[in-house]
Image (cartoon, rainbow, N blue to C red):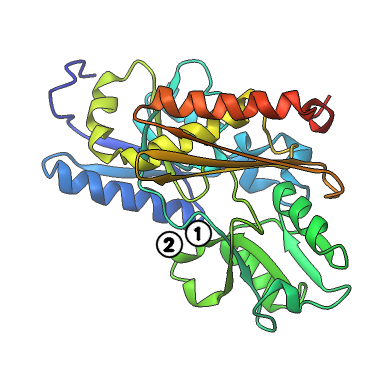
Amino acid sequence: MKTDKNAPLASLMIATRESALALWQARHVRDRLQALYPETPVTLLGMTTQGDQILDRPLAAIGGKGLFIKELEVAMEEGRADLAVHSLKDVPMDMPAGFTLAAVAKREDPRDALVSSRYTALTQLPKGAVVGTSSLRREAQLRERYPHLAIEPLRGNVNTRLRKLDEGRYDAIILAAAGLIRLGFGARIAAFLDVEDSLPAVGQGALGLECRADRSDVIATLSPLVDAETLLAVSAERAFSRALGGSCQTPLAAHARREQNTLWLRALLADREGKEVMRGERRGEVATVADAETLGLALADEFMARGAQRLLPT
């Protein structure tokens, strides 16, 4: 194994889930790395995770989104892979010991999207209409604003979820716009949901590149893929979520947006039924990751001062 971080790696192996979206993301990173390092072969190691195998229960009931990355981390730990590519919203707020988030690539559209063949806005859905989502965050916000709708769980990869909609099991489904766009399903989007109506998940739309913390050679190799603006935004979001112990069992959302030298962070914490929803926002001048994390922590402190503990799992 090479230890000189300035020396080109002989090869790179990317561990990835085998869903269509995960493979798109891994191939996207592979192609960018291949363009940067044409002499270094970059290949994929496709894997099936526990999160992919258990489809009959909500994520919150089986251990959360960390189930999508454990097997990939084992491959890196054993030296079978050098890095893994994740949807950043699937990456736990606290990285496991021995691993690091080496790079955050440029963010795609972070919004949620309404997909339906019959309706072009949530306001058009009649009483009792069935809306599918796998997210407690989306469920809480839907129940708050549209209590007349029937919210049903929806698991599976993007293609599976679209198929279930087309089979008539749902009147509409809510998915991340980024995944639909990346897979070429942008035309299926009936409406983009404004962040005011559906605040996105922490890190939504961004790609996180994970590797072993002791692989300084891989970290250096991945550094050109870091998108500074995205990194600052997601650092604030993740700091907020980490401070509140955010997980799949918590209807929590956070979204940061750059406005000149200021970062605007909006966040939400709710109960699953959407009967109690706490919102807050904070703006601050942010130049470094530390600045961004300080902003996120400050907003988390504000939430705790307002009684956020009552909405967090005990």
Q: Which residue is mark 2?
A: 182
What is the crowding at mark 2: few (fewer than 14 residues within 10 Å), some, or many (at least 20)? some
Q: Quadrant of residue 76?
A: top left
Give amino acid for label 1: Gly
Give the residue displayed 50% in from the left and 33% down from the top: 236
Give amino acid for label 2: Arg
| C-alpha distance separating marks 2 and 1 | 5 Å
Cβ–Cβ under 8 Å for marks 2 and 1: yes
Give the residue displayed 39% in from the left and 27% down from the top: 289
The spot of residue 286 in percent (x, y) is: 39, 31
Q: Horizontal placement of 281 versus 118: left or right?
A: left
The answer to which of 180 and 266 lies nearer the viewer is 266
From the image, which quarter does the N terminus lie in? Answer: top left
The answer to which of 283 and 82 lies nearer the viewer is 283
What is the crowding at mark 1: few (fewer than 14 residues within 10 Å), some, or many (at least 20)? many
Give the residue displayed 76% in from the left and 54% down from the top: 139
- Image disc number at residue 287: none
Identify whether 52 is placed above or below 300: below
Q: Which residue is mark 1?
A: 179
